[in-house]
């Protein structure tokens, strides 16, 4: 288990509410309502901002955050 000191203010990317997880969840068949209920309001808002991007921009964003784990520091752009 990772302690709060180890996270040093960063989001724990293992939790279901991470923005990249929320973005990808429908692709594996998760219901959007279930995804919404699992996410804090701020992360849901960030997810909606990503969804307003073009399909290519969304794929580029997902590839970037999936590799960099940028979402762990709260970035969604």
Image (cartoon, rainbow, N blue to C red):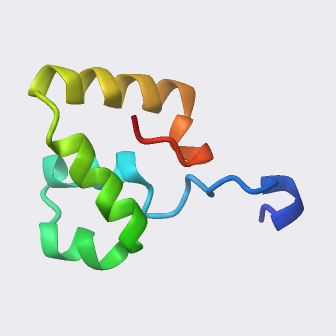
Is residue 10 rendered to the left or right of residue 66?
right
Closer to us: 51 or 14? 51
Is residue 68 rendered to the left or right of residue 38?
right
- Circle count: 0
18 versus 17 height, above or below: above
Closer to us: 11 or 25? 11
Which residue: 50% across, 41% down?
75
The spot of residue 11 in percent (x, y) is 62, 56
Residue found at the very far bottom of the displayed protein: 37
- Image quadrant of residue 6? bottom right
- Image quadrant of residue 65? top left
Which residue: 56% across, 52% down?
13
56 versus 28 height, above or below: above
Is residue 64 rendered to the left or right of residue 44?
right
Where, quadrant-wise, is the N terminus in this rendering?
bottom right
Which residue: 12% across, 57% down?
29
48 versus 63 height, above or below: below
The spot of residue 5 in percent (x, y) is 89, 61
The spot of residue 32 in percent (x, y) is 14, 67
């Amino acid at each position: 288990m990772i302690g709060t000191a180890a996270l040093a203010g960063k989001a724990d990317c293992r939790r279901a509410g991470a923005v990249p997880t929320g973005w990808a969840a429908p692709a594996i068949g998760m219901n959007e309502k279930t995804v919404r209920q699992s996410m804090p309001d701020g992360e849901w808002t960030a997810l909606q901002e990503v969804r307003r991007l073009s399909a290519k921009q969304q794929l580029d964003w997902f590839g970037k955050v999936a590799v960099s784990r940028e979402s762990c520091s709260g970035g969604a752009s």
